[in-house]
Image (cartoon, rainbow, N blue to C red):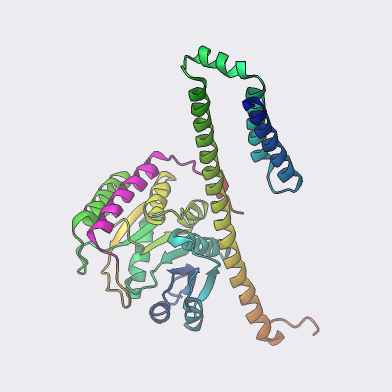
Amino acid sequence: MMTLASVGLGLALIGSVLALLLRRQLREKYAVLWIVIGLAVVIVGAVPGLLVGLTDVVGVQVPSNLLFAMSIVLLLGVALHLSWELTRSEEQIRRLAEETAITRAEIEAIRARLDAGPSSGPDPSA
Amino acid sequence: MVDSRRVLVIVPAWNEEQNVAATVGEILATVDYDVVVVDDGSTDETANRAREAGAIVLDLPFNLGVGGAMRAGFVYARRHGYDVAIQVDADGQHNPADIDRVLAGLEHADISIGARFSDVGDYHVRGPRWWAMRFLSRVLSRLTGTRLTDVTSGFRAANARAINQYVHYYPAEYLGDTIDSLVAAIHAGLRVTQVPVAMRQRVHGVPSQNPVGATIYLGRSVFALGLALVRRPRVQQLERVA
């Protein structure tokens, strides 16, 4: 029963990631990570012996502890990565905000010059 | 114009509708330089007041902090071929009569800071805020090899070299606009000097000066300075601008 639930969870994860990808609501660079996680959940769920074996190899006493520890490390990594991406995005947004402000000022200056009339500049029709 | 250099006065302003017109008016009456007010996402009439007073206005769509406002000003200065840019705060505490004094510091440096403590005027702080300022001054003085007493002062001038450096790197982070930008400029090989000036009281509004806030300020300034010092010249690839 647990096997089925675990495999189901993994498949649901992969399914939703693919759906988001198809709808262009998730960028590939984030999707790859989630697909790998989904696959890992499916594999660990389908082959229960794998987790137990791994637990013995690493020297952890209870398989669930290994699972929790791995999940926490993974989620920390994901959170850190998102903060990093967010910082980058904020910096880019900041550049754009500065650019729009400068562009706006320049458009206003040009408009003011146009409103002042063609007499202020050289007349092309002359 | 007083000399052949083209000078741009950059006034970062955030919700300063009560002060900005007077400040701009006073600058324009005192010196013959162009004034650009960077409206840092104000929700009040700051931009319009500044425009009426005769300044060029850069209207940021949302609040970026002093660092963002100033970098927009420096980018503008570079694109329009200004040789020198000087920051003057909108709240009126920087005296426009001192602008030429601060600019004079550029004769033998790339960045000139109008400093509040240099035995002129009566600007007083105590407690953690004072320790923070002293600590920052000490470290930066050693770094530059000149005596700096007021490194968080916003009254500072930059020549073309420094403008280029600022366009490349001028952080929006807290204290980044004063400390980090200065350390990065020093790392890039720019020379810094200071000029004694007196500061005036804010005309409207109160400056933040409570003990808790000041202690947090101390902690954050140590943190910001530490990071800035560890960072070496190569900073962010992302910071390139055409």
The answer, for residue B147, to whether it is visible in the render is: no
Magenta-drawn stretch contains B71: no
Query: Magenta: predominant secondary structure element?
Result: helix
A13 up-or-down from B195: above or below: above
The answer, for residue B74, to whether it is visible in the render is: yes
Q: Closer to the camera, B127 or B21? A: B127
A75 up-or-down from B172: above or below: above
Residue A23 in the image: state x and y as whole percent.
Answer: 75, 48
Q: Number of callouts in the render? A: 0
The image quadrant that residue A45 belongs to is top right
- Horizontally, is B132 left or right of B166 in the view? left
The image quadrant that residue B24 belongs to is bottom left
Residue B221 in the image: state x and y as whole percent.
Answer: 32, 50
Q: Closer to the camera, B14 or B151? A: B14
Tell me what residue is drawn at x 43 percent, y 74 percent.
Answer: B2
View extreme (front): residue = A1
A67 up-or-down from B64: above or below: above
- Horizontally, is B179 left or right of A22 in the view? left
Q: Which quadrant: the C terminus of chain B?
A: bottom right
The image quadrant that residue A123 belongs to is bottom right
View extreme (right): residue = A125
* Residue bounds of the magenta highlight: B208-235
Residue B119 in the image: state x and y as whole percent.
Answer: 19, 63
Magenta-drawn stretch contains B216: yes
Tell me what residue is drawn at x 32 percent, y 44 percent.
Answer: B143
Residue A111 in the image: state x and y as whole percent.
Answer: 66, 79
